[in-house]
Image (cartoon, rainbow, N blue to C red):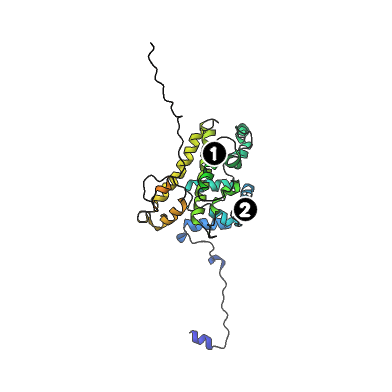
């Protein structure tokens, strides 16, 4: 039949018109999945731009240019906050932070009976995210950034001074070693230190404002909370090197863990080269006691 059609000298017109009653549009319900339907709805919606989001993206872009010497696209920035080196809590915190979705600062100015919550009761300034993470003079953020800097300088020569764009864009971190090549371990340590630090600062702020009614958290507690968070990350890294238990997708290479934490450990000179399975491996900052050292009591002599 096909050969006969080719050899025929006559041109056959085929009616391709579709009857409107039979012209079906959209998706077939019997084969439609929730994922396909949701993707279709998202594709039809116009993206809504928020002023706070745009400002934060600009700050992250500027900080990345200054600290990491490259200009990320917005897509790269959004991808960076889902980095596998971040915990789920940190990922959620970063997403809300970039969107300006935390209930702080100007959020409360639109509620007459809660307007006083917009101001930091310690500094008497608007308590936006930059104030909480970088500028607040209440005990917390300054001490934590000092601890992070101390640990970082054990491994690298310079510490980038924290800025709002820099800490929100810490997932973009890239650093080079002495040979000028990218250092995955160095970049990973930076991501862990900065992300865990900002989340500890945020939790301490909430504890101060909500649970302690504005009374600052003692400095020894701040010190120990940060140290606990970093030591937990070190412990999880060591545990996740078990490929047999956690599989290829969820486990971490031992070599990457060693690269990440080398030069930052307590009494590292006494540890073997591969300390992954050694007990009580901690970062090289000591905890602070919650009680002042007791004074030896003098012995009274018997009177004559």
Secondary structure under the numbered disc 1 in the rendered image: helix
Few, some or many residues within 10 Å of mark 2 (<14, 14–19, 20+): few
Q: Residue at x 45, y 61 (%)?
A: 31
* Residue at position x 52%, y 31% in the image: 212
Relative to 249, residue 134 above or below: above
Tell me the number on the disc at residue 74.
none
The location of residue 136, given as percent across then percent down, is: 60, 37
Report the residue at 52% width, 37% height from top. 204
Could you say which is closer to the camera, residue 191 or residue 13? 191
Tell me if I can see residue 128 in this picture: no
**Which residue reaches farthest top?**
304
Residue 301 relative to residue 153: left or right: left
Query: What residue does disc 1 label?
Result: 143
**Residue ID at (45%, 60%):** 30
Residue 41 rendering spot, x and y as whole percentages: 55, 56
Between 36 and 262, the one lying in front of the other is: 262
**Residue 286 location, quadrant:** top left
Say whether residue 212 is visible.
yes
Q: Is residue 111 above or below residue 61?
A: above
Sequence-wise, the earlier of marks 1 and 2 is 2
Pinpoint residue 46: horizontal percent, then vertical percent.
61, 55
For the image, the number of numbered tags is 2
Question: Considering depth in this image, is 77 or 288 the residue closer to the camera?
Answer: 288
Query: Is there a contact, CB below 8 Å, between mark 1 and mark 2?
Result: no
Residue 83: x, y in percent?
50, 53
Q: Quadrant of the C terminus?
A: top left
Q: CA distance from mark 1 to mark 2?
A: 24 Å
Mark 1 is surrounded, within 10 Å at the Cα level, by few (under 14), some (14 to 19) or many (20 or more) other residues, namely some
Circle 2 is placed at which residue position? 66
């Amino acid at each position: 039949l096909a050969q006969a059609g080719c050899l025929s000298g006559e041109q056959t017109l085929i009616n391709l018109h579709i009857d409107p009653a039979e012209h079906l549009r959209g998706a077939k319900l019997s084969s439609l999945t929730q994922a396909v339907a949701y993707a279709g709805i998202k594709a039809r919606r116009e993206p809504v731009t928020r002023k706070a989001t745009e400002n934060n993206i600009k700050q992250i872009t500027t900080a990345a240019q200054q600290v990491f010497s490259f200009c990320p696209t917005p897509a790269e920035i959004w991808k960076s906050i889902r980095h596998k080196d971040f915990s789920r809590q940190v990922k959620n915190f970063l997403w809300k932070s970039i969107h300006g979705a935390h209930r702080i600062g100007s959020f409360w100015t639109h509620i007459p009976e809660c307007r006083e919550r917009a101001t930091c009761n310690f500094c008497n300034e608007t308590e936006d995210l930059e104030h909480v993470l970088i500028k607040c003079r209440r005990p917390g953020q300054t001490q934590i950034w000092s601890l992070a800097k101390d640990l970082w300088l054990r491994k690298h020569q310079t510490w980038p001074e924290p800025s709002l764009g820099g800490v929100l864009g810490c997932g973009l971190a890239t650093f080079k070693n002495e040979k000028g090549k990218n250092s995955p371990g160095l970049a990973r340590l930076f991501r862990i230190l900065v992300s865990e630090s900002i989340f500890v600062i945020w939790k301490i702020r909430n504890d101060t404002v909500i649970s302690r009614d504005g009374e600052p958290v003692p400095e020894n507690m701040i010190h120990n909370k940060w140290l606990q968070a970093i030591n937990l990350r070190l412990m999880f890294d060591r545990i996740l090197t078990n490929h047999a238990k956690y599989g290829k997708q969820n486990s971490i290479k031992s070599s990457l863990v060693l690269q990440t934490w080398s030069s930052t450990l307590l009494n590292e000179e006494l540890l073997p080269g591969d300390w992954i399975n050694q007990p009580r491996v901690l970062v090289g900052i000591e905890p602070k006691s919650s009680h002042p050292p007791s004074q030896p009591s003098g012995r009274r002599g018997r009177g004559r």
